[in-house]
Image (cartoon, rainbow, N blue to C red):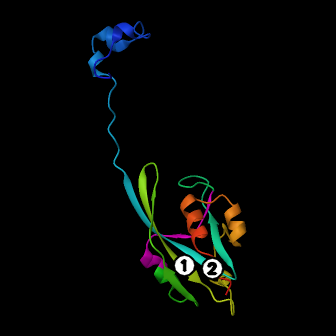
Amino acid sequence: SLRRPDCAACPLQGLCRAQASGQQEAYPVKSRRALRGRRSHAVLWLQWRGRCLLVQRPAKGVWAGLWSLPEFDSCEALNAQAAAWPGHGQWLPTIEHALTHFDWSLTPLCWQWPTRGAGPAGVWVEPSGRWALPEEALALGLAAPVRRLLQSQPLSRR
């Protein structure tokens, strides 16, 4: 047992500082468990002519270098951005995703941009973005929740 060490049977007893100091019961030291954080964001599943907009995440941080959907600080921020867009959107159920140090809630807005008229390229400027057909998107390195979302519903070709 960790709290009742068997020093006589231990192959490292000659090197053990705990045994040398008579403090075997004090080791190993339990580390304090860090509190899990919680984050919430909205993501945009922008669809146009059978393609969706994907953005590559930064080289460092969560999902480093993977492709994902454009992310917004909140549903309100995404609603404000989309307020003047043509087409229509639908909020989908929130995705709960557990990472090593925090739980992440991602609420997707699926927006169908009309095929007629100006395309979203004139409205949406994203230097790390690309438009991808479903099979192209699924061939990329996608974050797991994004992959599941893209597989869950077919893209509209309207």
In three-dimensional space, the C-alpha distance between marks 2 and 1, rounded to whole angstroms, equals 7 Å
Which element type, helix, strand or loop, lies under badge 1?
strand
Tell me: residue 145, above or below residue 59. below
Residue at the spot of label 2 = 47
Tell me: residue 101, above or below residue 137. above
Q: Residues within 10 Å of mark 2 (few under 14, many from 20)?
A: many
Residue at x 56% of width, y 58% of height: 144
Proximity of marks 2 and 1: CB atoms separated by less than 8 Å? yes
Say which quarter of the image contains residue 146: bottom right
Query: Sequence order check: which comes first, mark 2 or mark 1?
Result: 2
Badge 1 amino acid = Cys
Measured as percent of width and height from the top left, residue 73 is found at 45, 70
Disc sitting over residue 62 in the figure: none
Which element type, helix, strand or loop, lies under badge 2?
strand
Measured as percent of width and height from the top left, residue 93 is found at 45, 73
Badge 2 amino acid = Gln
Q: Is residue 38 left or right of residue 71?
A: left
Residue at the spot of label 1 = 110
Q: Residues within 10 Å of mark 1 (few under 14, many from 20)?
A: some
Say which quarter of the image contains residue 65: bottom right
What is the span of residues highlighted in magenta in the rendered image?
Answer: 66-78
Q: Is residue 13 left or right of residue 112?
A: left
The image quadrant where one finds the N terminus is top left
